[in-house]
Image (spheres, coloured by chain):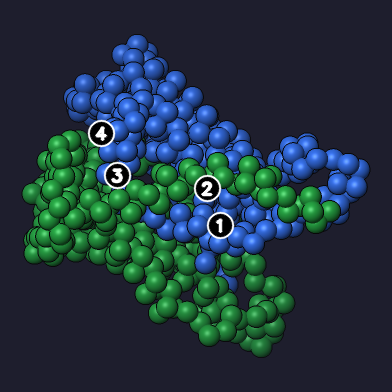
């Protein structure tokens, strides 16, 4: 038995195809990104080694810092929106009729491609006959703004579809976690005279804290990677007001053929993502898991 | 909690539901209107007549080729991903070897990688081996990038399979290949179908790889192809609406029939420390 189940040839045959694929298409490119970042390169011609100059340039590049700031703001918004999702999940999980159906309805936007979502919301935000401004004018707002053309508003306007798209996802995760809490604990608290709010705040929330931490990581890391939606909705505009790290990197490489510099930004994006993940994990790490 | 409390609770839950669904309903409504109705009437008005010709127009405008590309690329990539992930997961969870933890770790690191950090080298690698503007570059990229998440969903299921199955099979003189393909793999069908549906959602909606690696219209998938269409019908909102509805319909239908699998897949692919 043990001999058969540790046959090296079989192990290699079964695991190597998958391993080679991720090695060639995920890990090697990541290493190459760092390497290309050391080059002056237009993507076609020959490379010229310039050391850390691209990275130094990035650190002095206002556009890069602006894009990083926008990514950071989206991460903050996304994390704050978790509170709304959590509140909805707490209501849904408190033995409400139709909770399963509602949870599935909330999930629908998550199934659509970011491109379709972007196009849909561009229409919703259309200044003259989009749904939003028509609604605003109907209730008496005389000059509603052109949401996506306003540098001070565009980031918020982009965040609404993000909130919309991921609501069902986070609600689903919280709901599942809340459903896992044993009924007996809640019953005991009720007998002791705890109010629903107290139960939610003092019992349910601490019990699902592990899941909440996971969702914080997901929300922050997800925000650092936003691309499709913004690329299609605004292309980073107006005048860079909605540029994020990924879209800036993409433009550098594929619109201006600055592959070396684009790679440096791509590598910084990777490093930032990994560091942020580690920091949040450390900051939210509990000494002991709550047992129940 | 009193009746009034419940009333407001349901009211707010319903409001959220409307917020989640109404934009899609609105999209459907304007896909059935013409520009005159869209621009002169309230955006919430029902279409005066259902102009299905918008759908006919964009279909005849050539959306079919994008649709077909999305179908076959999504399908082939799913098949490859699920079989390769199943094989690797089987070996990692069921067979005894020194490096299994390390190899599993490599796959799980794949979950944290922002794809944008890899796209420039991927582009130049594909350029070197003549795979730019070739749909197979998309198929293998989807396969590689979906392997980690697919394996993660499979893992839990594989760990719970009883050892006795393998013991019995081997005592009966069954080879490992036969055991895997004829006994283990069929047993994993419930969790496999979850991974299939998750892969379907990811692949069908993927944008940046196709947008970067594919330049010919004949190889584009729907997500990228509809961008062309929207440019072409810049001012024809009905046509744009129809295009978008066509592009999201397969996933919405799949959700209608397999919503439990989708829910399962999304939650098991997300809850990971």
Residue B48 in the image, given as x and y percentages of width and height:
33, 21
Chain that bears disc 4: B
- Secondary structure category for the residue under label 2: helix
Q: Say if A168 sits above or below A93 in the image.
A: above
Look at mark 1 in the image and give the residue it sits on: B103
* Residue at x 58% of width, y 80% of height: A289
User: Which numbered circle lies on residue B121?
Assistant: 3
Residue at the (57%, 33%) spot, across then down: B79
Choose the circle earlier in sequence order: 3 or 4: 4
Q: Secondary structure at mark 4?
A: loop
Do the numbered discs 1 and 4 sit on residues whose CB atoms are within 8 Å? no
- Chain in blue (letter): B
Check if mark 2 and mark 1 are on a common chain.
Answer: no
Q: Is A143 displayed left or right of A9 in the figure?
A: left
Along the line of sight, the residue nearer the viewer: A70 or B72: B72
How far across and how far down the image is residue B20, in percent? 41, 47
Q: Chain of mark 3?
A: B
Q: What shade has chain A been given? A: green
Q: Of callouts 1 and 4, which one flags the residue occurring earlier in the amino acid sequence? A: 4
Residues at marks 2 and 1, CA–CA distance in whole angstroms: 8 Å
The residue carrying pointer 2 sits among few (fewer than 14), some (14 to 19) or many (20 or more) residues within 10 Å by Cα, namely many
Residue at mark 1 shares a chain with residue at mark 4 = yes
Q: Residue at x 67, y 58 (%)?
A: B97
Marks 3/1: CA distance? 23 Å
Cα separation, mark 3 vs mark 2, equals 19 Å
The CA distance from mark 3 to mark 4 is 49 Å
Q: Which residue is mark 4?
A: B42
- Place of residue A160 in the rendered image (x, y in percent of width and height, measured from the top left): 30, 53
Q: Secondary structure at mark 3?
A: helix
């Amino acid at each position: 038995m043990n001999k058969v189940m540790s046959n090296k040839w079989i192990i290699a045959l079964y695991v190597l195809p998958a391993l080679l694929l991720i090695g060639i298409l995920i890990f090697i490119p990541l290493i190459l990104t760092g390497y290309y970042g050391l080059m002056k390169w237009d993507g076609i011609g020959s490379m010229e080694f310039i050391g850390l100059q691209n990275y130094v340039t990035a650190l002095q590049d206002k556009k890069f810092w602006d894009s990083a700031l926008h990514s950071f703001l989206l991460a903050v918004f996304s994390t704050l929106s978790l509170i709304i999702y959590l509140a909805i999940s707490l209501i849904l999980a408190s033995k409400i009729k139709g909770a399963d159906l509602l949870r599935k309805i909330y999930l629908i936007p998550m199934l659509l491609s970011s491109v379709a979502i972007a196009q849909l919301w561009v229409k919703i935000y259309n200044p003259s006959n989009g749904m939003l401004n028509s609604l605003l004018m109907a209730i008496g707002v005389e000059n509603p703004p052109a949401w996506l053309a306003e540098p001070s508003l565009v980031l918020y306007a982009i965040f609404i579809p993000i909130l919309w798209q991921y609501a069902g996802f986070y609600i689903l995760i919280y709901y599942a976690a809340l459903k896992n809490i044993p009924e007996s604990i809640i019953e005991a608290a009720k007998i002791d005279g705890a109010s629903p709010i107290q139960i939610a705040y003092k019992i349910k929330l601490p019990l699902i804290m592990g899941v909440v931490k996971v969702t914080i990581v997901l929300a922050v890391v997800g925000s650092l990677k936003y691309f499709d939606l913004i690329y299609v909705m605004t292309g980073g505009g107006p005048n860079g007001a909605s540029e994020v790290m990924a879209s800036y990197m993409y433009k550098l490489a594929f619109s201006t053929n600055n592959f070396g510099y684009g790679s440096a930004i791509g590598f910084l994006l990777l490093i930032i993502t990994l560091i942020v993940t580690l920091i949040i994990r450390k900051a939210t790490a509990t000494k002991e898991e709550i047992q129940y | 909690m009193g009746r009034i409390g419940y009333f407001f609770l349901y009211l707010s839950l319903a409001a959220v539901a409307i917020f989640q669904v109404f934009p899609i309903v609105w999209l459907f409504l304007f896909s059935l209107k013409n520009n005159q109705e869209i621009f002169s009437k309230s955006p919430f008005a029902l279409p005066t007549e259902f102009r299905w010709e918008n759908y006919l127009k964009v279909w005849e405008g050539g959306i079919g080729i994008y649709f077909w590309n999305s179908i076959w690329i999504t399908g082939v990539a799913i098949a490859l991903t699920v079989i390769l992930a199943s094989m690797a997961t089987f070996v990692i969870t069921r067979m005894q070897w020194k490096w299994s933890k390390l190899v599993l770790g490599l796959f799980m690191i794949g979950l944290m990688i922002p794809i944008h950090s890899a796209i420039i080298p991927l582009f130049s690698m594909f350029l070197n081996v003549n795979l730019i503007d070739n749909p197979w570059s998309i198929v293998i990229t989807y396969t590689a990038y979906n392997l980690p998440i697919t394996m993660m969903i499979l893992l839990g299921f594989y760990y719970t399979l009883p050892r006795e199955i393998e013991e019995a099979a081997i005592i009966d003189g069954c080879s490992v290949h036969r055991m895997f393909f004829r006994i283990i793999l069929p047993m994993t069908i419930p969790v496999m179908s979850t991974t299939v549906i998750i892969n379907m959602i990811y692949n069908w909606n993927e944008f940046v790889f196709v947008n970067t690696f594919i330049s010919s219209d004949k190889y584009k998938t729907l997500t990228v192809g509809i961008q062309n269409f929207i440019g072409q019908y810049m001012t024809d909102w009905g046509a744009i609406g129809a295009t978008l509805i066509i592009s999201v319909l397969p996933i919405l239908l799949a959700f209608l029939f397999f919503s439990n699998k989708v829910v399962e897949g999304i939650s098991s692919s997300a809850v990971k420390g």
